[in-house]
Image (cartoon, rainbow, N blue to C red):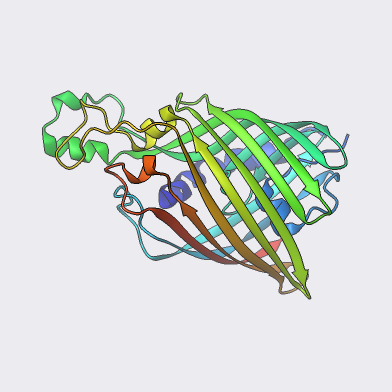
Amino acid sequence: MLGRYQRHFGRIIYLVWWLLFSLLPTKVSASDIASSVTGGVDNRFADGGYFELGASVYSVNKFDVRQTEHEAIQPSLLISGIYQYKGAFVEMVHQSQDGINLGFNFWNSENWSLDILAANLKSSWARPEGVNPEDLIEAQRNDYLMSEESLYIGAGLRATRYWDDHYVFQYHIVSDYYDGQGIQSSARLGKSWQVRNWNFHALASLEYASSSLNQQLFGISGDEATARFPEYTPSSSISYGLELGVAYPISESFVFRAMYRMNVLSDEVTDSPFNESGYVSFFNASISYVF
């Protein structure tokens, strides 16, 4: 799914950055936790933002049979940034687990921030439209079940708590309004610390997915079932993960980053006929220019 996301990502990137630079000119403290914990939480009330452009290489294990173009190591373009002004914000943080966010900060204090997420964009799976699986022979249904790329576009709320400029807790919950795929939420706790010029971080996560979302992603109906992909109806699930990373400023404008993430998948995912692993192991290293 990661490779599919990056391809689909290119189709929406122009729209996101057009919105970013066309936002109308209260200070705001909105921030994806991936940015807060890797970059620290200093000046979180300041308007403005940053933009990064660079290159990265990543490695991820094959955890789903639908990853037909999976490669052990792949290069990718790094495009990342955050802009916030007059309460409105756009977040597109490289390799964030929470996708792309467009929203509005409606309340903050010294330690808390509450945001409305008007659009939370992530990758998803979707069956080809206009096809009745009952009209297909088994081999065709197998191809049909391999799915195609899609988007999850949700709206909801996000709450962030800060401690001592080094700890961040963030909870978000969104419901898909693009294709009615269901509800997902996450609770993440992060910590950063600095050793000389090296900035380290750790991030622990719990993620919830509703039964309707799991059915969309990992379920198979009776009309779709084949010998290879038998009928499967998952319920809601909770999975958890841990991320460790480091950043080093090569110069005033260039930054090196490396990160390793392990997500342990729930039984609702691993019991799916699409599943090939009980976990997702992900490593990324990048060099970027910060504008």
Name the residue at 71% across, 74% down: 250
Does residue 93 appear in this view?
Answer: yes
Q: Residue 227: percent from the left, percent from the top?
A: 14, 39
Task: Look at the picture and state if 98 lies above or below 103.
Answer: below
Q: Residue 257: percent from the left, percent from the top?
A: 63, 67
Name the residue at 42% across, 27% down: 212
Does residue 291 appear in this view?
Answer: no
Q: 30 or 291, which is in the foreground?
A: 30
Q: Is residue 141 left or right of residue 239?
A: left
Q: Is residue 34 left or right of residue 233?
A: right
Name the residue at 60% across, 32% down: 173
Q: Residue 213: percent from the left, percent from the top?
A: 43, 31
Task: Look at the picture and state if 177 lies above or below 52.
Answer: above
Q: 20 or 63, which is in the foreground?
A: 63
Task: For the C terminus, give its image quadrant.
Answer: bottom right
Quadrant of the rendered structure where residue 132 is?
A: top left
Quadrant of the rendered structure where residue 42 is?
A: bottom right
Name the residue at 77% across, 57% down: 40
How many numbered discs?
Answer: 0
Q: Residue furthest left?
A: 137
Q: Is residue 163 left or right of residue 68?
A: right
Q: Is residue 12 left or right of residue 276?
A: right
Q: Residue 86: percent from the left, percent from the top?
A: 82, 34
Quadrant of the rendered structure where residue 119 is?
A: top right
